[in-house]
Amino acid sequence: MNRRQFLAGGSATLALAAAGPAFAQQQRLRMIFWGSQTRAERTYAAADLFMKANPGTGVEGEFLGWNDYWAKLATQTAGGNAPDIIQMDYRYIVEYASRGAIAPLDDFVGTALNVADFDPLQVDSGKVGGKLYGISLGANSVAMMVNRAVFEKLKLPLPDASTTWDDFSQLAVEITNAGIRRGFYGAADGSKNEQIFENYLRQRGKALYTADGQLAFDASDVAEWFDMWAKLREAGAIPPADIQELDQQNIDTSLLTQNKVAVAYANSNELVGYQKLNKEPVALANFPRLTAESKGGHYRKPAMLFSVFAKSPNQKAAAEFISYFVNDLEAAKVLGTERGIPESSKVRDALSGTLDEVGKTMLSYVSGLGDLAAKLPPSPPNAAGEVLIAFQRTASGVAFGSQSSSDAAQAFVTEADAILKRKT
């Protein structure tokens, strides 16, 4: 949905679009991002503030769901007509930077682009090969989205830092067996969720990728992963594959939002969108530990970044918009913590006294991970997106019973190795 459709005949951008020659005299920035309706509302409100402060510049936006976003962005960049401002994910930044699809922003730092009060480590999270290609829009960590009302109704403890996967399985089975709603399950199937898989690997002392972009796990890790979820499926803790496929990996179609499960998996900043779409209170919880003694597999990462299209004729203006987006206190009030905990210390200080309960929950979660959180891993290699698609396809095949865990795991690792080798 683009901004014009979103606004439905409403405000500034339509006025600009209809202005004819007057509009042609103005500088026009295009922006693309993925996310929910809630994110779109906040983003366009911040863009309106920017346009009010910069009357010579117009901003048009377009937002899509995660699954559609990357295909469209790939088409646009290949065609040389991508928007000026691109919402970027940490997993894709190496790929887009190495292809020359996004521009280095170093020359704008200190002038058009202000990151002076960012944590230097968070600035570095947007660098590839020593150059700055993305500006973090907020910090977050992966999390479970938990329907608090269901747990309270059944007098079950909410998952916490001591919860193991065995504990979690028992809780999920109890919820399913309670039958509080027809076709309601304890938790969503997370077998094709790469973030949970990465957390699982990190608890085993491994990772998704090595520093030089190769797989940092083997087929036995994948087979055990698929087996774990197969047991949960067999026990009734999670839905069968056909129901899980209703989830198109966005907040709107999440099985939690569809009221079919009590627990789903997302990033902590997505609590804003989940709570808006769910009538019952949603809590955040960390992913379970493998054992009571296991270290956690979490880390704090940029929830998402803004990058600038390499062929944009408006790179300086795009950098100014990004700088406004991450530093302006009025913009911060409308953006809140929907994209994570702000990186600017001034913005964090300004927001700290104004956060609602959802914002306070997110801040408490991200800052309170304790020993569950460790060092940020290297940026994934430029083929990580293709490997993810193979992983998700393989996991779906196992869930539908078309392959055994061991056969699927070996096939996936072989395919992933080939993808990485081809794109090295």
Image: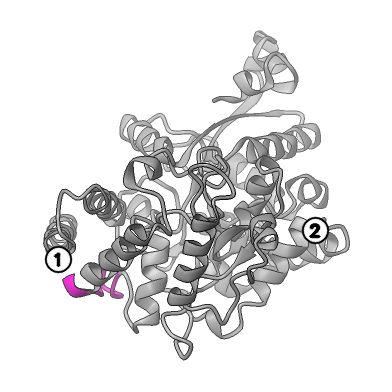
Q: CA distance from mark 2 to mark 1?
A: 44 Å
Q: Is residue 128 left or right of residue 264?
A: left
Boundaries of the magenta span: 209-220
| Residue at figure coordinates x 56%, y 74% from the top left | 121
Question: In the rendered structure, which amino acid carries the disc numbered 2?
Answer: Glu
Residue 406's disc is: 1
Residue drawn at (33%, 32%) of the image: 75
Q: Quadrant of residue 20?
A: top right
Left or right placement of residue 194 versus residue 257 in this view: left
Up-down relation of residue 243 to residue 129 (above or below): above
SS class, disc 1: helix
Residue at the outermost front position: 178
Residue shown at 48%/37% (left/top)?
A: 65
Q: Nearer the viewer, mark 2 or mark 1?
A: 1
Colour convention of the picture: one colour
> Is 246 left, or right, of 227 in this rendering?
right
| Helix, strand or loop status at disc 2 | helix
Q: x%, y% of residue 2?
A: 56, 25
Residue shown at 67% from the left, 74% from the top: 367
Name the amino acid, label 1: Ser
Disc on res. 416: none
Q: Is residue 86 left or right of residue 285?
A: left
Marked residue nearer the N-terminal end (2 or 1)? 2
Indicate the quadrant containing the N terminus: top left, top right, bottom left or bottom right. Answer: top right
Residue named by callout 2: 357
The C terminus sits in image quarter: bottom left
Residue extending furthest toward the bottom:
293
- Mark 1 is surrounded, within 10 Å at the Cα level, by few (under 14), some (14 to 19) or many (20 or more) other residues, namely some
Q: Examine the structure image and report whether residue 212 is included in the region drawn in magenta.
A: yes
Q: Main secondary structure of the magenta part?
A: loop
